[in-house]
Amino acid sequence: MTNITRVLAIAFLAFIAWVIYMANAGQSSVFFDFVAAIPYGDKVGHAGLFGTLTFLAVLASRFAGWKAYNTKLYFGAIAVTLFVIGEEISQAFIPSRTFDFTDLSADAVGILLAALVLRKLEQSAIAQTGLQR
């Protein structure tokens, strides 16, 4: 299962990289047209894309992370967060793009929702197996 999840995570990251490349190059895409046709589609798209990437990254890393107080910080979620911050800031330096704090906020919502779902999944798996990581 882990190998499949890793392949899916890498493939999804490649898809996101392709979408970013298209946007940076100012190219049009059926995805951009679809998102533009939905109210708040851009923000929903940001949350969905980066929430999905977070979900896959954490699964692929088998829930690896740091414990801080009563919270687990998943390495996959941290990696996606750093990627998102870097990508959004880079837009300030690309003529066809603009930095948008609301996009960054939508990304954060997706990452946070994925992490919350993952935490429940991990807790459920621990309860079922009786194992603690």
Image (cartoon, rainbow, N blue to C red):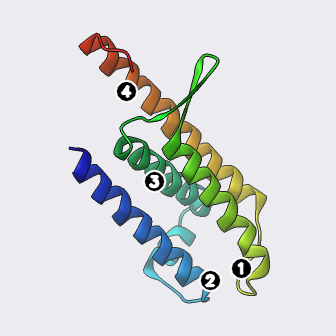
CB atoms at circles 1 and 3 under 8 Å apart? no
Residue located beneath label 2 in the image: 24
| Residue found 51% across the figure and 77% down from its top | 33
* Residue 12 located left or right of residue 97: left
The residue shown at (65%, 67%) is: 87
Label number found at residue 112: none
Q: How many tags in the picture?
A: 4
Instruction: Check if mark 1's residue and mark 4's residue have beta carbons within 8 Å.
Output: no
Q: Which residue is mark 4?
A: 121
Q: Observer-nearest residue: 40 or 129?
A: 129
- The quarter of the picture where the C terminus appears is top left
- Closer to the chain start, of discs 4 and 3, is 3
Which amino acid, by three-letter code, is at mark 4? Leu
In 3D space, how far apart are the residues under numbered discs 1 and 4 (Cα atoms)?
37 Å
Residue 72 shows in the view? yes
Residue 53 numbered tag: 3
Instruction: Say what secondary structure mark 4 lies in.
Output: helix
Mark 2 in CB contact with mark 4 (< 8 angstroms): no
